[in-house]
Amino acid sequence: MKKSKIKSFCKINLSLRVLKRLKNGYHNINSLITFCGIYDVISINKIKTQKDKITFSGKFKRGINNQSNTVTKTLYLLRKSKLIGKQNFRINIQKNIPHGSGLGGGSSNAAELLNFFSSKFKKKIKKEKIKEIAEQIGFDTPINLEKKNTFLTGKGNQFVRLKKKFRFNILIIYPNLVCSTKKIYQKNKTTNKLKTLSKFHLKNNKKLITFLKKEGNDLEKTVIKVYPRIKKIIDFIKNQEGCYFSRITGSGSACIGIFSNHNRAIYCKKKIKLKFPKYWCVVSKTI
């Protein structure tokens, strides 16, 4: 097997409702998820050594445990299921997606590795088995197996893939804060009612934007309480010309703004660089 390079795209929660807590301690989630053109790069090739060599590089490599992460967990579960044998690999992940940002970088890395082994390895792995392993890695991993717009129904782990493609201009700010998903959910007191996404909302972008403006992210109040500076960022984005709405994605700390066009998003980015010079900020489009 020659060295392969895989793009691992980040996810965006356009909306997020936290529903009642389940018996296992987790919450049902009602959320509309999309993906944008920011991605990690995974390099992988076979090696003749006793152990895998897993490394992280890039701007956001700091804070990731080389011995315990979604990549090592993926390899462990594949071997446990006797799907890749004793072959070892050299894997490097160039981290362009901030760790602990709510952008799902780790889940995306795991999902893309599962897809790689499913399609490129000699022994084909059934989709059902890949999904089963993905569920063991993390809540977002099965969602990342396909980079399609996805609606989490709020009924267990059920989700619906949407045929419609979004044409959103997205500005993302990461304020150099690593948010613990577990900590945010433990502190969260906000729960909401189940919301359905009808075909009416998907007829065109204008109707979808109107729907999303009324939505929000139920974890936002908790994140702001823990990290007050998040509110300043959201308010700043929200007040810029051409911004439809602004909120955190996932459990934070990254904040997003959805803009009417690319140029206005770029102009906002320039203003953010002056206002918050130390924060990572990019403009991207949905894929």
Image (tube, rainbow, N blue to C red):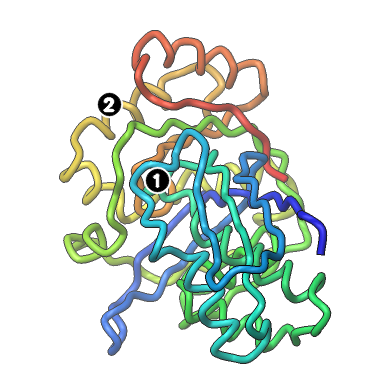
Q: Quadrant of residue 227?
A: top left
Q: Position of residue 112 (x, y in %)?
A: 66, 62
82 up-or-down from 94: above or below: below
Q: Give amino acid for label 2.
A: Lys
Query: Cα distance, mark 1 to mark 2?
Result: 17 Å
Of badges 1 and 2, the one in the foreground is: 1
Quadrant showing the N terminus: bottom right
Give me the residue at 35% from left, 66% from top. Answer: 18
Q: Position of residue 4 (x, y in %)?
A: 76, 55
Quadrant showing the C terminus: top right
Q: Position of residue 77 (x, y in %)?
A: 53, 82
Label 2 environment density (alpha carbons within 10 Å; few <14, some 14–19, many ≥20): few
Badge 1 marks a residue whose secondary structure is: loop
Give me the residue at 57% from left, 58% from top. Answer: 109
* Disc on the earlier residue, 1 or 2: 1
Q: Give amino acid for label 1.
A: Ser
User: Toward the viewer: 54 or 107?
Assistant: 54
User: Toward the viewer: 107 or 221?
Assistant: 107
Q: Position of residue 61 (x, y in %)?
A: 44, 42
| Figure disc tally | 2
120 up-or-down from 41: above or below: below
Q: Which residue is mark 1?
A: 101
Q: Which residue is mark 2?
A: 232
Q: Is residue 32 left or right of residue 113?
A: left
User: Toward the viewer: 50 or 142?
Assistant: 50
Q: Quadrant of residue 29?
A: bottom left
Badge 2 marks a residue whose secondary structure is: helix
Give me the residue at 62% from left, 39% from top. Answer: 38
